[in-house]
Image (spheres, rainbow, N blue to C red):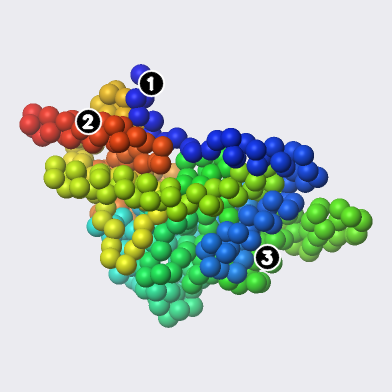
C-alpha cells in the first residue's frame, strides 16, 4: 500500500528550482563558480579551512583514503555499525578493513575497543557520526596520535552536529559529507570533503579531476596547457547540484530545530512506553539525521512489515556490516563477534524524521509503533 507517512521527503521547492535555473542561464554547468561558492560557504559553516565537493559521499570517503596514501598492505579500523560505503572504500583502495564493535548506548564506534585492534599495518581510523551524534573526536585523536594514525570522519549523518563545541572536519585529517537524496541537505547525489590540511585539499583537487593540474574553469578565458601529474579519477560535483545546495545552508538551523523537536517527542513517548533507542550524550548537539528504536530481535522484522502494512515508512540503519554475505566471506575465519553491533543490527528500526512531518503524522507514527509492540508483547513470542 502507499504510505500514509513517507519515510523521507525532501524539502526542496521553487527557491531551489530557481537557483538551478540560474545555472542554466550562465556559462558553467559543472566545476564552475557555484561549486566554488558552495565550498566556501560550507567551509565557513564548518569552521574549517577547505571544502572540496565530489560526486557522492562514497567517492569522498574513497578519495580521502587515497589522499591519505592508504593502499595495499594497510589496515583501516571501521565501525561495524555503519553503511557499507565506509568499509567498501577501504577495500577499493586496496587496503584491509578491521571492524570495531560499537558503544551499546549510542551505536557509535566503541572507543575503548579500538586500541586492541591496532597492528603494525594499521594506518587509519574511520569513525562514523552515527545518526548525527558526533563521536568523541578528542578521544579518537588521542589514540590516533599515540599510534601515528590518520583519522577520516564519515560525517554523512552529521552536517549540523557538534560535540563540546567542535564540528566534523575541525580536528581530524578529513571529514566526509553526503548529499544523497535522503540526507539532511541534498542535491540527489553529491558529497564533500572538509579538511584543514592544504596538501590534502590539493591532493583531492587532483584526484577528483583525472590528476589534471588545471581544470576547465582555469582554462576558460584562454587555453593553457595542462599536465597530468597523478593518476586521478573523474569525481567532481556539478554546478547544477551546487546551486541546489547553496540555499539549503540557510535552512540548516530551522530544519535542525524541527527535527530535534520531533526526535525529543519520540524520545518522550517511547521512554513512557518502555521502548529503547540510542541516547544522545551530554555535550553533544546531534544533527538528528535518523531516529531509530530498538525492539526485541525476535519481533523486529514483524514490527517492520506491520508498520509498512499500516502505511508507516520505515527502514533499517543498519544491519551490522561484518555480518553481510560479502564481508562474511571476505573475513572468513577472522570474522569477529561484535555483540553490540550485532544486537543493534538485529533490533533497530528507523522511523520518519524530516522537517515536513506534521504533528498528526508524528502521532500516527508513535501510536502505531506502540500499538504493534504492545500487541506482540501481549501475545508473547
Ligand atoms: C549515505 C552514507 C554514505 C554514502 O554517501 P553517498 O553520498 O550515498 O555515497 C556513507 N556513509 C554513511 C554512514 C552514509 O549514511
Q: Please, what secondary structure does the residue beneath circle 1 have?
A: loop
Dot placed on the residue nearer the N-terminal end, 1 or 2:
1
Q: Please, what secondary structure does the residue beneath circle 3 have?
A: helix
The residue mark sitting in front, 2 or 3, is: 2
Nearest the eye: 352 or 305: 352
Dot placed on the residue nearer the N-terminal end, 1 or 3:
1
Q: Are marks 1 and 3 in contact (CB under 8 Å)?
A: no
Nearest the eye: 157 or 83: 157
Residue placed under numbered mark 3 in the picture: 203
The residue mark sitting in front, 1 or 3, is: 1
Mark number, residue 368: 2
- Mark 2–mark 3 distance (CA, rounded to whole Å): 50 Å
Nearest the eye: 141 or 331: 141
Q: Is residue 259 left or right of residue 205?
A: left
x, y percentage for residue 6? 39, 30
Q: Quadrant of residue 221?
A: bottom right
x, y percentage for residue 35? 68, 52
Q: Is residue 292 left or right of residue 12?
A: left
Location of the C terminus (image quadrant): top left
Q: Please, what secondary structure does the residue beneath circle 2 have?
A: helix
Residue placed under numbered mark 1 in the picture: 2
Taking 273 as reference, is 130 above or below it?
A: below
Q: Is residue 153 left or right of residue 205?
A: left
Q: Quadrant of residue 119?
A: bottom left
Q: Is mark 1 within 8 Å of ligand 1?
A: no
Amino acid at each position: 500500500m502507499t504510505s500514509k507517512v513517507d519515510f523521507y521527503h525532501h524539502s526542496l521547492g521553487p527557491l531551489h528550482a530557481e537557483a538551478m535555473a540560474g545555472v542554466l542561464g550562465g556559462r558553467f554547468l559543472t566545476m564552475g563558480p557555484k561549486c566554488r561558492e558552495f565550498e566556501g560557504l560550507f567551509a565557513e559553516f564548518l569552521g574549517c579551512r577547505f571544502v572540496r565537493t565530489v560526486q557522492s559521499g562514497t567517492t569522498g570517503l574513497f578519495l580521502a583514503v587515497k589522499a591519505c596514501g592508504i593502499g595495499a598492505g594497510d589496515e583501516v579500523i571501521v565501525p561495524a555499525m555503519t553503511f557499507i560505503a565506509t568499509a567498501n572504500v577501504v577495500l577499493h583502495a586496496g587496503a584491509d578493513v578491521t571492524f570495531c564493535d560499537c558503544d551499546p548506548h549510542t551505536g557509535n564506534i566503541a572507543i575503548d575497543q579500538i586500541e586492541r585492534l591496532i597492528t603494525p599495518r594499521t594506518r587509519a581510523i574511520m569513525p562514523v557520526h552515527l545518526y548525527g551524534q558526533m563521536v568523541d573526536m578528542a578521544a579518537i585523536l588521542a589514540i590516533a596520535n599515540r599510534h601515528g594514525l590518520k583519522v577520516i570522519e564519515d560525517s554523512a549523518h552529521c552536517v549540523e552536529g557538534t560535540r563540546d563545541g567542535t564540528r566534523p572536519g575541525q580536528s581530524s585529517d578529513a571529514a566526509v559529507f553526503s548529499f544523497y537524496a535522503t540526507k539532511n541537505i541534498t542535491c540527489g547525489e553529491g558529497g564533500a570533503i572538509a579538511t584543514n590540511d592544504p596538501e590534502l585539499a590539493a591532493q583531492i583537487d587532483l584526484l577528483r579531476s583525472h590528476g589534471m593540474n588545471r581544470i576547465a574553469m582555469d582554462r576558460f578565458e584562454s587555453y593553457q596547457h595542462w599536465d597530468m601529474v597523478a593518476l586521478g579519477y573523474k569525481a567532481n560535483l556539478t554546478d547544477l547540484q551546487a546551486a541546489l545546495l547553496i540555499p539549503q545552508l540557510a535552512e540548516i538551523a530551522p530544519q535542525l530545530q524541527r527535527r530535534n523537536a520531533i526526535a525529543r517527542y519520540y524520545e518522550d513517548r517511547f521512554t513512557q512506553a518502555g521502548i529503547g533507542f540510542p541516547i544522545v550524550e551530554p555535550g553533544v548537539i546531534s544533527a538528528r539525521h535518523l531516529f531509530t528504536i530498538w525492539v526485541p530481535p525476535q519481533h523486529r522484522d514483524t514490527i517492520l512489515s506491520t508498520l509498512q502494512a499500516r502505511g508507516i515508512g520505515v527502514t533499517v540503519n543498519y544491519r551490522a556490516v561484518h555480518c553481510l554475505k560479502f564481508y562474511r566471506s571476505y573475513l572468513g575465519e577472522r570474522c569477529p563477534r561484535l555483540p553490540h553491533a550485532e544486537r543493534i543490527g538485529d533490533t533497530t528500526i528507523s522511523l520518519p524524521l524530516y522537517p515536513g512531518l506534521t504533528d498528526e503524522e508524528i502521532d500516527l507514527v508513535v501510536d502505531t509503533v506502540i500499538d504493534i509492540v504492545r500487541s506482540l508483547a501481549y501475545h508473547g513470542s
